[in-house]
Amino acid sequence: NTVLTPTPEDAKLSSDFLGNKGHLPWPVANGVITQAMGRHTEHGITSESDGVEIKTNEGAPVRVVFDGKVQAVENVYGTYLVVVNHGAYFTAYSNLKSVSVSKGQKLTTKQMVGTAATDPSTGDSSVQFSLYKGVDPVNPQLWLKPE
């Protein structure tokens, strides 16, 4: 593993991001957390979630929670994942039906990154929102503005 030395711009972005803990806007305008971060058992199957699942409206715009730069845009089994770099922190937005950003693009807080996908079997629309400090998952609920 290589430790990257942050540029002064990355160090400032990290500091600004850290200073907004508990005050970040939600990645969707209307939503409710339906699954918290951590270990979950459903129908006898245990899984680990690095983030939270937020139920929202069908086709809801998904927005970046802080200024940053798009690190990756990936197709994951038919839905999209967008990863945004905020200095030493990264946010990930998955289960997107469509994306409106590209790798390397600079983003500003609340800029749209894509739209929420809908599960055809349940009709529920949701977004998975994760937060990392480096490669370590951090509970994103502690960083979002209280509802």
Image (tube, rainbow, N blue to C red):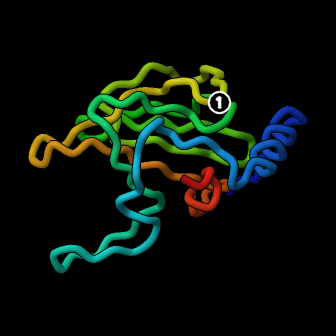
Say which element carries label 1.
loop
Q: Is residue 44 above or below residue 75?
A: below
Identify which amino acid the numbered label 1 is placed on.
Thr
Mark 1 closeness class: few <14, some 14–19, many ≥20 residues within 10 Å: some
Q: Quadrant of residue 137?
A: bottom right
Which quadrant holds residue 47?
A: bottom left
Q: Residue at x 45, y 31 (%)?
A: 73
Question: Residue at image x 54%, y 43%?
Answer: 26
Q: Horizontally, is 12 left or right of 79 in the view?
A: right
Quarter containing the N terminus: bottom right
The number of callouts visible is: 1
Q: Is residue 86 left or right of residue 126?
A: right
Q: Which residue is mark 1?
A: 109
Q: Image height check: is 10 above or below 54?
A: above
User: Residue 59 at x, y = what percent?
Assistant: 30, 29
Instruction: Work out whether 78 lies above or below 17.
Output: above
Measuring 31% from the left and 37% from the top, which residue is drawn there? 57
Closest to the observer, 105 or 52:
52
> Which percent across, then down, holds residue 65?
60, 38
Residue 143 drawn at (x, y percent): 64, 55
Position of 31 compared to 2: left or right?
left
